[in-house]
Image (tube, rainbow, N blue to C red):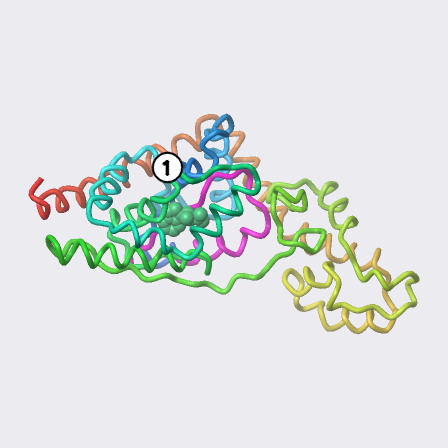
Amino acid sequence: MRILSGMRPTGKLHIGHLSVLQNWVRLQAENKCFFFVADWHALTTAYDETRELRQNVREIVADWLAVGVDPERSTIFVQSHILEHAELHLLFSMFTPLSWLERVPTYKDQVRQLGEQGKDVRTYGFLGYPLLQAADILIYRADAVPVGEDQLPHIELCREIARRFNHLYDAVFPEPQALLAETAFVPGIDGRKMSKSYGNVISLDVGPEELGRLVRLMITDPARIHKTDPGHPEVCTVYAYHTIYSPTAVPEVEARCRGGKIGCVACKALLSEALEQMLAPIRAKRAEIMARPGYVEEVIAAGDARAREEARATMALVREAMRI
Ligand code: TRP
């Protein structure tokens, strides 16, 4: 299968992104994969915060490589380097009813929510965002798109665009399907959703001391004052992490917590160790990548060249079909 997915460059990735990336790594073993940095998409909301955009693109690609996305197997590229995405987006815009974009379920909510946060996204670009996403996908004639559940309406729109194009002109595009992987919900260290804006993230490249400090800050069962008090794992962030990162230890941790046989400090030390084992190789590989001058840029340039070739081939078919 031809598989495509993208991420916005919003800064360094955190461990909440890990299962998504591990899924990419699995997919690349048996499929033709395209993974790209959606920097134009970042502009649909953060159009006035571009100072760190280039650095963020570099950091996110380093994160992908550190987790094992392999530039020999997968085509890793940057959206804004492949101008053909913009051309296809423009052509799609000619036959896309406004109502299709206005009825994307997240659209009105997000305009309101971001508006409340002081960001005006009543823009042409923000409304057209799912159409740009359709162009990103269809220009590689992808069969499948690994995404989170929040993106399902966008994939549905993409399928409608493919159908409409094929009906109006010629059968150029397959109708891509969404690939929903099981991804663990990783809470932030305060138990809320992990998000940079909450300051509760564990980034992928966190060092061992900082990791220990973040784990010690995690919120545990507030009803537990003394070590011998019986704990309630279901309300404890540390326990939630154990179920994700050290599942084999869970039965024992749970029994000892409920029985007041292990204190939160010791429980956190166990978790730190499990996280450190998982993150140490990623951190080492990331450091190696960042230490090689020009390496990330080389990976991107090679991926861009492959992506561009594919995008150009599709655009030749599109222009032919549309008689342009
Ligand atoms: N919209 C996606 C997000 O915000 C990023 C994205 C842009 C994407 N184009 C894509 C994902 C194409 C999959 C396929 O997460």
Residue under label 1: 78
Q: Which residues are magenta?
A: 1-27
Residue 17 colored in magenta in the image: yes
Which of the two residues, 65 or 210, is positioned nearer the viewer here? 210
In the structure shown, which secondary structural element does the residue marked by tag 1 occupy? strand
Inspect the image, locate mark 1, and give the three-letter code of the amino acid beneath it. Val
Residue 211 colored in magenta in the image: no
Which of the two residues, 174 or 289, is positioned nearer the viewer here? 174
- Position of residue 291 relative to residue 194, above or below, is above
- Position of residue 230 relative to residue 285, above or below, is below
Which x, y percent locates residue 89? 26, 42
- Position of residue 271 relative to residue 47, above or below, is below
Residue at 33 percent across and 55 percent down: it is 3
Residue at 47 percent across and 28 percent down: it is 50
Report the side of 316 relative to 58 (left or right): left
Quarter that holds the N terminus: bottom left
Residue 283 visible in the snapshot: yes
Q: Residues within 10 Å of mark 1 (few under 14, many from 20)?
A: many
- Could you say which quadrant of the image residue 260 lies in? bottom right
Which x, y percent locates residue 208? 71, 43
